[in-house]
Amino acid sequence: MPPLTNRHIAVLLDMAGCPNRCRHCWLGAAPNRRLPAESLRRVAEEFRSWRRPGESRPFFESLDLASWYREPDYTPNYRALYELERELSDGNASRFELLSIWRLARDPTYAQWAREVGTAACQITFFGMEETTDYFTRRPGSFRDNLVATERLIEAGIRPRWQLILTERLVPEMGALVDLVRSLSLEERVREMGGEFGIFLNTPSPDGEAFHIEDLRPTPEALEGVSPYLVEKTLRHFGAESLADCLGRPEGDWLPELVEQTKPHADRPEWPAFEVDSSFDVYSNLDELSPWWRLGNLWDDGLDEVIRRFESDEPPGMQANFQVPVGELARRYGRPRGRRLYARGDLITRWIRLWAEARWRGVAHDSPGAVS
């Protein structure tokens, strides 16, 4: 990757962790640790004061800082941390239409506070009905938390949006979720707020925790049971003309196109962002937080070394992303008879994972994928 040129940067510090261990999460399932507020100040100062060797002025001219990248507002002092984000950032602290569903279900004042700081909509993720959703979040009670959160969002004037993660486990329960939407009158109630209730299907990206549920990735037959209501809402959410445009095509259908690609998957990101875990290991905000994407430790290696590794594509994940032609990945790992559905970028992400992990482990790169 060429040297950084953008002098605006985002840095996200995992100060509390997450109550869930979702099986679809690209961020993985790291342990929860509580970091003191001073940690955020130290990290902000480290990035804000960074200079290239031989230069006299700091390289980054503006900084956006967040105290989370998994679950926002998971700590009891979430309001103070939000104010600290605002103090240390050059832009406005944001929740990106993401709130803590766990806290929404437990803190009656949280939704109103979120509305006051500018949150207009909030996404809630379902994997099916109660047993299935709790299974995928690995937390009993998460389905019921979703329902409580939906009610509290509406009461506070925040539009709820339901994301349904499409796996083979969701397929037989899609109808029950649509019935639930109707029984709760969500379309009518959100319309009374002056908005539209959003609900859509989405497939998991095959990285992080989701790499281990590839056997549950849907095939084309899964789409045959999608109700016209969910089709319409999904197409509207993605601005697409067909479900294939947003939920993907069978892997084998992609291969004739992708084996001919001579360029790598990605260009240099225009806006660099870094994620710092609770041990102060640093990752680029490009893919999963795995050893083959790790840039180094902020304190043990230093930010000079972290930036050097970022700019030189040293982690195997970055090599696969920015240097290996997509056609080479397709020839090594593509499954001509694969029938599971992938968006184009998600399929390449799977191959990048296979290539990067193999390189990190020091094994040959010609192993086929494990899931048919």
Image (tube, rainbow, N blue to C red):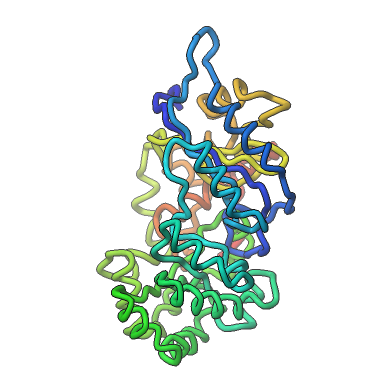
Toward the left, the furthest residue is 241
Direction from residue 229 to residue 241 in the image, left or right: left
* Residue appearing at x 59%, y 36% in the figure: 316
In the depicted structure, whether residue 170 falls above or below residue 41: below
Depth order, front residue of 22/259: 22
Please state the horizontal and vertical placement of residue 243, each as a whole percent of the image: 33, 71
Vertical placement of 239 versus 257: above or below?
A: below
The reply, left or right, for residue 44 in relation to residue 140 is: left
The number of discs equals: 0
Q: Does the image show residue 275? A: yes
Q: Which residue is at a point 54% across and 44% down the rendered structure image? A: 66
Determine whether, in the image, residue 284 is placed left or right of residue 299: left
Q: Which quadrant holds residue 358?
A: top right
Residue that appears at 49% across and 37% down: 89
Vertical arrangement, residue 321 with respect to residue 207, above or below: above
Q: Quadrant of the C terminus?
A: bottom right
Q: Is residue 273 visible?
A: no
Q: Residue at x 49, y 50 (%)?
A: 349
Residue 306 x, y percent position in the rendering: 60, 27
Residue 134 place in picture, x, y as percent: 65, 76
Q: Is residue 22 above or below residue 188?
A: above
Residue 317 locus on image (x, y percent): 56, 39
Specify the farthest residue to the top: 54
> Nearest the camera: 18 or 347?
18
